[in-house]
Amino acid sequence: MTFYSGDMIPEWKNNLFIGCLSGMHIVRLVIENNKVTGEERLLSEESQRFRDVTQGKDGALYAVTDQGRLYRIAKK
C-alpha cells in the first residue's frame, strides 16, 4: 500500500492505494480529516491478485501481481 504524493495525477494526491489479493483489484481511498470519504476500485477487470503498489519517481503508480505482471497507472 502507498500514499500518492506525485504531481502526475493531482486529483489523487494524498489518496491511499492498496493492492488486494483476494479482491483482485487496487483500492483507491480518498482520505479527508483522517476519515475515508471515497473509494474507487482500479483494474478489477484484469482479474489479477495485486501483490504490491508503489509510486515511481516519474509520478506514476506501479503495481505487480502474483503472476509477475507489472502495471503502470498514469494519465494518458
Image (cartoon, helix red, strand yellow):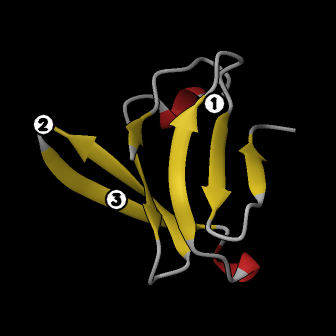
Q: Read off the residue under disc 2.
A: 33
Q: Read off the residue under disc 3.
A: 38
**Residue found at x 46% / y 31%:** 4
Based on the displayed image, in which of its 4 quarters is residue 42 positioned?
bottom right
Q: 25 above or below 35?
A: below
**Residue found at x 77% / y 60%:** 69
Mark 1 or 3, nearer chain start: 1
- The amino acid marked with disc number 2 is Asn
Give how far apart the Cα atoms at labels 1 and 3 are: 17 Å
The reply to whether residue 27 is visible in this rendering is yes
Do the CB atoms of the residues marked 1 and 3 lie less than 8 Å apart? no
- The amino acid marked with disc number 3 is Gly
Do the CB atoms of the residues marked 3 and 2 lie less than 8 Å apart? no
Does dot 3 land on a helix, a strand or a loop?
strand
Give how far apart the Cα atoms at labels 1 and 2 are: 21 Å
**Residue found at x 71% / y 18%:** 58
Specify the label residue 9 is tagged with: 1
- The amino acid marked with disc number 1 is Ile
Q: 10 above or below 26?
A: above
Give how far apart the Cα atoms at labels 3 and 2 are: 12 Å
Q: Please, which residue is most extreme toward the left here?
A: 34
Mark 1 or 2, nearer chain start: 1
Based on the displayed image, in which of its 4 quarters is residue 15 positioned?
top left
Does dot 2 land on a helix, a strand or a loop?
loop
